[in-house]
Amino acid sequence: MALGLIANCSYMMEERILVVDDEKDICDILQFNLEQEGYLVDVAVSAEEALSMLTDVHQLLILDVMMGGMSGFLLAEKLRKEGSVIPIIFLTAKNSENDMLTGFSLGGDDYISKPFSVKELLARVKALLKRSALIRIPAETRWSYKGITIDIPANRVTIDEKEISLTKKEFDILSLLVQTSPNLLSRAEILDSVWGDNEYVLDRTVDVHITRLRKKLGDYAALIVNRSGFGYYLNLDHGKET
């Protein structure tokens, strides 16, 4: 039985970015330079305002950490708990290793210290949007195979009509494997697509996340196949029999 794709292939999403910083000068600089690169840019001056503005149309969040009221870290944590998978670039004067690790542990995809180079920031924005495009699917798309359904826009995976809980990284890995099936992906390719240039992530991290993912997939764990020394791929011949 083949993997089913339900999609409107003509659907296109513009690259829209939400900038969140309580310093107006920084917001102005970022908005001007990002718009010069062709992005659509919205600006919020607090985490609370960002929550009211953020929609599924936004494809990237540039988020200051230290703001009055809710911090950027708290906003990111809230979004991830609610199931949002929007890529996040933290922008902050806090640049210790512990701060960076905290940002990544809360679901951040990149971390840029103030003062920052506009040229470097633009390069990282471009790279992150490119990576996230590998796992970004048109809004009317979902994948199904026998009793398992992966609804990518809704960030939901169901098995026999029961939803299973995945972390953002687990969902990103599964989405990537589904979309590239039956091609084999090396650990480096998975790292680049899901974690980007995060220097704190090792190849072993992929194995750990896939082990956890397989456990949550239960009877469908065998869909994810490891070729020792090469990487992972999705093998539909090992699915659950119906």
Image (cartoon, helix red, strand yellow):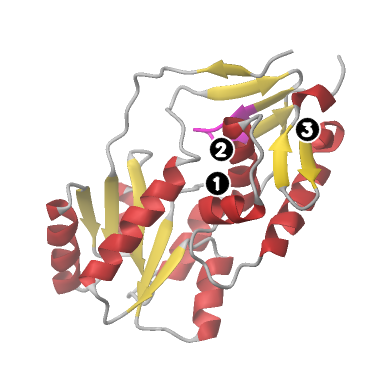
Asked if the residue under mark 2 is in contact with the one under mark 1, i.e. CB atoms within 8 Å, the reply is yes
Was residue 153 drawn as part of the magenta stretch in this picture?
Answer: yes
The span from disc 3 to disc 1 (Cα, nearest Å) is 24 Å
Q: Which residues are magenta?
A: 150-156
**Cα–Cα gap, marks 2 and 3:** 19 Å
Q: In what quadrant of the picture does the C terminus appear?
A: top right
Residue 67 lies in quadrant: bottom left
Residue 51: x and y in percent read 36, 53
Residue 220 image point, x, y percent = 81, 32
Question: Badge 3: few (under 14), some or many (20 or more) residues near its Cα, within 10 Å?
Answer: some
| Residue at (55, 52) in percent of width and height | 194
Q: Where is residue 99? Give x, y as percent.
A: 50, 80
Mark 3 vs mark 1: give the one in front.
Answer: 3
Gap between marks 1 and 2, in whole Å? 7 Å
Looking at marks 2 and 3 on the same chain, the residue that comes earlier in the sequence is marked by 2
Residue at the bottom extreme, as displayed: 96
Can you tell which mark lies on residue 139? none
